[in-house]
Amino acid sequence: MSATPTPLLDIPGLPAGPADIRLIVSDMDGTLLDDAKRIPDGLWPVLAELRRRGVLFSPASGRQYATLARQFADVAEGMVFIAENGTYVVRDGVELTSDTLAPAVPAGIARTVRRLVADGADVGVVVCGKRSAYVERTDEAFLAEVRKYYVEHRIVEDVTAVEDDVIKVALFDFGSAERSTAPALAEFAATHQVVVSGEHWVDVMNRTADKGAALRGLQRALGITPAQTMVFGDYLNDLEMLDAADWSFAMAGAHPEVVRRARYLAPSNNDNGVVRTIARVLGL
């Protein structure tokens, strides 16, 4: 992509002129990243200008903190990372908030996945701790997907026996997560959040944890209002954080429910939509 983003001149319904934005939060996959999982080149000069203006940019993702910190290593100082779908929020290596699961929950999900596999499902479980992610499945096809989102991961014999603070359990389904894996987790949906976070991913977290809860906590801590907050998302795990911002953008091609909930529609992740929209709204 070009290092100089093409100006975006028209977003239906968007007010004219620069806005008083103090916080920008963006999902990663399907939103900021293109389909090849690349950060657009045009983001880096925009981040420098945002920093100069005192505007905080915060990645919000189902990815683990270690993965996000590596992706933004050159600009990470002072940046708030909303990791693991809001269950783990970190700034400058210091935990701001976390929402850990009771030990029985990841163990129960792991047993459910084992039953699904025994019945022929092509699914694998990732137990997400603060220090690392943990997997039992060892085939390269599955591990290749895990590496995309979990830089720190370990293969263990039994994910129910890991010694870590578990903040999320993620399941990768080589088929449709929304149609296959999510319905199989109905027993956990009665007490926890079961969120389809992508075509192939389902995340299980406490009911008190989501990107929106993390964002609202950050807004309170920084004294920033929803009217001063801009949010970008594309999938169902982004809904709550879209609700927390007056400047909420669904990406072109986003899940229909995301498009319905957001106030505005931005160009797609493959059309540099996040960077171009920030430039348009802030008059960069």
Image (spheres, rainbow, N blue to C red):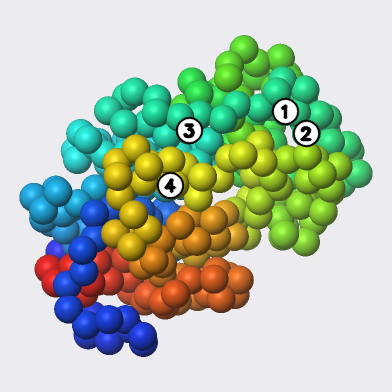
CB contact under 8 Å: marks 2 and 1: yes
The residue mark sitting in front, 3 or 4, is 4
Q: CA distance from mark 2 to mark 3?
A: 20 Å
Instruction: Using the image, determine if residue 246 lies above or below residue 223.
Output: below
Q: Earlier in the sequence, mark 3 or mark 4?
A: 3
Is residue 43 rendered to the left or right of residue 114?
Answer: left
Q: Nearer the viewer, mark 4 or mark 1?
A: 4
Q: Which numbered circle lies on residue 106?
A: 1
Q: How far, Cα to Cα, is label 2 from label 4?
A: 27 Å
> In the picture, residue 10 is in which quadrant?
bottom left
Q: Amino acid at mark 3?
A: Tyr
Residue identified by numbered label 3:
88
Of the residues shown, which amino acid type is indicated by label 1?
Pro
Q: Residue at x 82, y 44 (%)?
A: 190
- Which of pointers 4 and 1 lies earlier in the amino acid sequence? 1
- Residue 42, how many percent across, how many down? 19, 62
